[in-house]
Image (cartoon, rainbow, N blue to C red):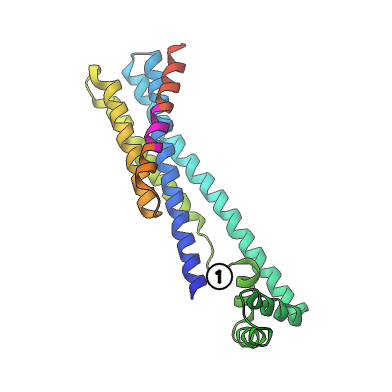
Amino acid sequence: MQVKKKKNMEQELNAIRAGVLGSNDGILTVVGVLFSVAAATNNQFTILIAGLADLFACAFSMASGEYASVSSQSDTEKAAVENARRDLKNNYQQQLVLVQNYYVDKGVTQQTALAIAQELMVKNPLKILVNVKYDIELDEYMNPWEAAFASLFSAGLGGIFPLLAMTFLPTNLKFVGTIIVTAFAVGLTGYLSAKLGKGLVKKAIIRNIIIGLITIAIHYGIGQLF
């Protein structure tokens, strides 16, 4: 039961990770493009198209990357299960000893560990073996579509903040207002990631804001060169 809870938490953290990475990437890449283009030209239509194009490109890029990454992890887990299935078929006794040693390493006596291993292996040998050998819960694999959609949605939502600010704020407030909106947005993702992941909230917020401001400064400087 403890192992199952651990795996469920791993799945939740994977979704959180995909969402946070997606939102941060959406915010920072879009604001970076907006500031670099806005520093090079005053044409509002050009700035809007550049930001909008980057928003879509970023969202789909993050989604495809997450899908490929999580699919690879899921395939690896399924391959490990097949290896365990073959091991059980070809050398059951050796796998029984492996499970026994697993409990011995946890401080259980040899005799008690053998009794535990025998009972567990009778009930569901494949389930216990993949858990012991690979720390995998049988048939509970990472979902690549879940990670992909989390990244797609969060990257798109994140990038909307600086895009709307740069598009609709008055001309004299576009740069300052977009910086403020971006700082708020990345600070919010830092807060949410820390709360959901039970991390340090203040540290996460400050870190994200500093990274956001550095990103803006770098891209604005690049735009000034042209």
Picture coordinates of residue 191 (x, y %)? 34, 45
The residue at which mark 1 appears reads as: 137
Residue drawn at (65%, 69%) of the image:
81
Q: Residue at x 67, y 80 (%)?
A: 100
Q: Which residue is at 48% across, 45% downward? A: 63
Query: Picture quarter containing residue 94?
Result: bottom right
Residue flagged by tag 1: what amino acid is it? Answer: Glu
- Boundaries of the magenta span: 207-213
Relative side of 196 to 174, left or right:
right
Relative vertical location of residue 87 with respect to residue 7 in this rendering, above or below:
below
- List x then y, in percent, for residue 30: 40, 31
Q: Residue furthest right?
A: 90
Q: In this orientation, does residue 146 appear?
A: no
x and y, in percent, of residue 56 in the image: 42, 36
Q: Name, please, the residue furthest toward the top.
A: 226
Taken as a whole, is the magenta stretch helix, strand or loop? helix
Can residue 129 be seen in the rendering of this structure?
yes
